[in-house]
């Protein structure tokens, strides 16, 4: 029997496979396809202080081995989340995290404080890395001082596990990771999407209404593995790895690079059952390599 | 309930140079499918294509357990699908979205180009309720209206082409039988056509459903990429649509 269970701060995940925010709705969208209780965790849609409409259509463009999106944090807002969504998802037998987003420190704190009340949400993922909003988002995540300031403020009001999601759109992701660790983060997750752009040459205009958007999918994976490896060697807190994971082998790259858990994102759009295939693939890999505990391969590189 | 299933291609038919159809066999019993729902088709073997392609369901046969897709070749994904052969498998996530309501005793179904695809199964669903719809199919030319004969058994079929190569010359809204007093209109096709049909319906007070085809990633309401503006804010075309009551769409009837 292989042990797939890993720990993020004080949260025990039944396996290291979680779903990335903004790619898995509130989990319910996938309930027809998979048994959600087999997941290590679900990170639900980015949630802000107020309801948001997001950016105008078109906000998606397919690119080689990936896609650009510019959804812009469309979500129901934290109050509706608490009132309507939480009761529907609270009993799913997995670890549910809320991705907390905002345009100001006050907004991040307001959302975090409201989520703090819920017994069945053991942690949040603080999104200081969304590239698709005009105010806040990535603005906080590209400067170590600003990043530390948000994290310190949220740390004051939020008492459970605080994961901070980092952007790759920086010169040194390690500097940001160290700054948020210092400011009280319990874990970091990376990478959010890479800022990108694509142009429809026939129409001579950008594909996205916002011109630029976030690149995700298999094309970003080598960048993500590199950054996870760099950060895992620079901080003491656990690292959650994501970026282009579509198979167990992809997940293993992140684990070997030092991630204690992974998030599967864009691949959910291509195969709604991919997360379970990855869980099974990890177990199969461990058996083939005679590994009793998945933790034995975490950070071996 | 949505499913993910490997279908086998029983029959592939080329329909002129722009379209082909695939009859897909389900290994077990097909679930119940609404007219206007769609499938997300996996595309293998093309470097440029990662995402599934949303394709509307053209026909359903619960006895033979087959689905028919009518596909217009428009880009890398559909070009790759066009290379599939009989006997190949095709993975589908389906049935997706919210279909037509199949209301009215004297309905008009208006299709243009690839937008005629969902209207065949829709016509059959009307027949199942004892209603014989009027079906108006339009295109720039005769070649751009595929599977013309398929509709004949299920309703009164009218044609209009911009070059006059089939039926009346002009746009669908200029067809002399367009302005007969129908009590329900369903339309799928190019946006300018649906807007013209929608404007007419609203003016006459006729309930009208339009089927949109925004670009999608997931097809199940998770990625929020395919939104359209409605009176209740952004809604996913894949989940709340693709079929919408035209009066619920915000700004849709304005000229753009």
Image: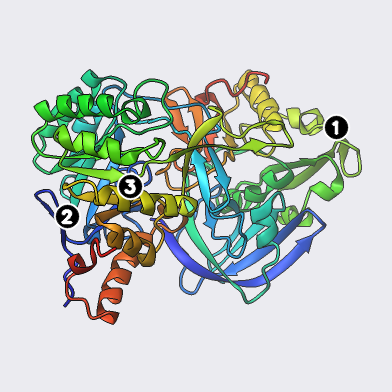
| A255 or B250, nearer to the observer | A255
- In the rendered image, residue B253, in percent from the top left (x then y), is placed at 62, 22
* Badge 1: chain ID: B
Q: Secondary structure at mark 1?
A: loop
Pointer 3 residue: A20
Can the viewer see residue A265? Answer: no
Mark number displayed over residue B37 = none
Mark number displayed over residue B170 = 1
What residue is drawn where x is 67% and y is 74%? Answer: B86
Task: Indicate left or right for B51 with A268 as reference.
Answer: right
Q: Are marks 2 and 1 on the same chain?
A: no
Can the viewer see residue B195? Answer: yes
* Badge 2: chain ID: A
Vertical relation: B53 (above or below) B89: above
* Badge 3: chain ID: A
Q: Marks 2 and 1, Cα distance to the nearest angstrom?
A: 59 Å
Image quadrant of residue B14? Answer: bottom right
- In the rendered image, residue A205, in percent from the top left (x then y), is placed at 67, 30
Mark number displayed over residue A93 = 2
- In the rendered image, residue A278, in percent from the top left (x then y), is placed at 33, 65
| B175 or A253, nearer to the observer | A253
Q: Earlier in the sequence, mark 2 or mark 3?
A: 3
């Amino acid at each position: 029997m292989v042990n797939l269970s890993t720990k993020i701060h004080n949260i025990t995940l039944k396996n290291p496979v979680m779903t990335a925010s903004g790619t898995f709705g509130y989990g319910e969208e996938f309930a027809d396809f998979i048994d959600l209780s087999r997941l290590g965790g679900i990170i639900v849609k980015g949630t802000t202080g107020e309801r948001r409409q997001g950016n105008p259509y078109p906000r998606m463009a397919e690119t080689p081995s990936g896609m650009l999106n510019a959804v812009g944090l469309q979500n129901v807002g934290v109050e509706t989340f608490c009132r309507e969504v939480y009761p529907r998802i609270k009993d799913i037998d997995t670890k549910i995290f809320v991705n907390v987003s905002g345009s100001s420190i006050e907004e991040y704190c307001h959302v975090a404080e409201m989520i703090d009340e819920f017994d069945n949400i053991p942690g949040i993922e603080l999104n200081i890395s969304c590239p698709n909003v005009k105010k806040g988002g990535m603005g906080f995540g590209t400067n170590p001082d600003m990043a530390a300031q948000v994290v310190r403020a949220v740390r004051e009001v939020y008492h459970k596990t605080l994961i901070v999601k980092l952007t790759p759109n920086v010169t040194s992701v390690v500097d940001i990771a160290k700054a948020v660790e210092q400011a009280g983060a319990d874990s970091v997750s990376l990478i959010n999407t890479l800022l990108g752009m694509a142009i429809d040459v026939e129409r001579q205009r950008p594909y996205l209404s916002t011109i630029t958007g976030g690149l995700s999918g298999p094309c970003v994976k080598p960048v993500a593995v590199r950054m996870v490896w760099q950060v895992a060697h620079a901080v003491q807190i656990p690292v959650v790895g994501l970026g282009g994971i579509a198979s167990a082998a992809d997940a293993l790259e992140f684990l070997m690079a030092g991630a204690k858990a992974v998030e599967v994102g864009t691949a959910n759009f291509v195969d709604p059952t991919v997360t379970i295939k990855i869980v099974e693939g990890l177990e199969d890999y461990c058996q083939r390599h005679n590994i009793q505990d998945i933790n034995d391969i975490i950070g071996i590189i | 309930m949505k499913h993910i299933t490997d279908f086998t291609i029983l029959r592939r038919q080329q329909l002129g140079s722009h379209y082909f159809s695939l009859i897909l066999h389900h290994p077990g019993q097909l679930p119940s499918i609404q007219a206007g729902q769609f499938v997300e088709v996996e595309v293998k073997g093309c470097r440029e294509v990662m995402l599934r392609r949303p394709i509307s369901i053209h026909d359903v046969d619960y006895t033979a357990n087959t689905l028919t897709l009518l596909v217009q070749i428009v880009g890398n994904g559909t070009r790759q699908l066009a290379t599939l052969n009989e006997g190949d498998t095709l993975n589908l996530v389906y049935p997706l979205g919210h279909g037509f309501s199949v209301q009215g005793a004297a309905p008009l179904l208006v299709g243009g180009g690839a937008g005629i695809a969902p209207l065949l199964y829709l016509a059959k669903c009307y027949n199942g309720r004892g209603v014989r719809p009027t079906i108006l199919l339009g295109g720039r030319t005769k070649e751009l209206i595929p599977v013309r004969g398929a509709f004949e058994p299920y309703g009164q079929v009218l044609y209009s082409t911009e070059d006059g190569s089939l039926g009346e010359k002009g746009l669908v809204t200029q067809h002399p039988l367009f302005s007969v007093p129908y009590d329900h209109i369903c339309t799928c096709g190019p946006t300018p056509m649906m807007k013209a049909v929608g404007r007419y319906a609203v003016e006459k007070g006729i309930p009208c459903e339009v089927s949109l085809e925004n670009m999608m990633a997931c097809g199940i309401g998770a990625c929020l990429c395919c939104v359209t503006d409605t009176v209740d804010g952004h809604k996913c075309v894949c989940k709340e649509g693709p079929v919408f009551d035209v009066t619920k769409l915000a700004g849709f009837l304005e000229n753009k």
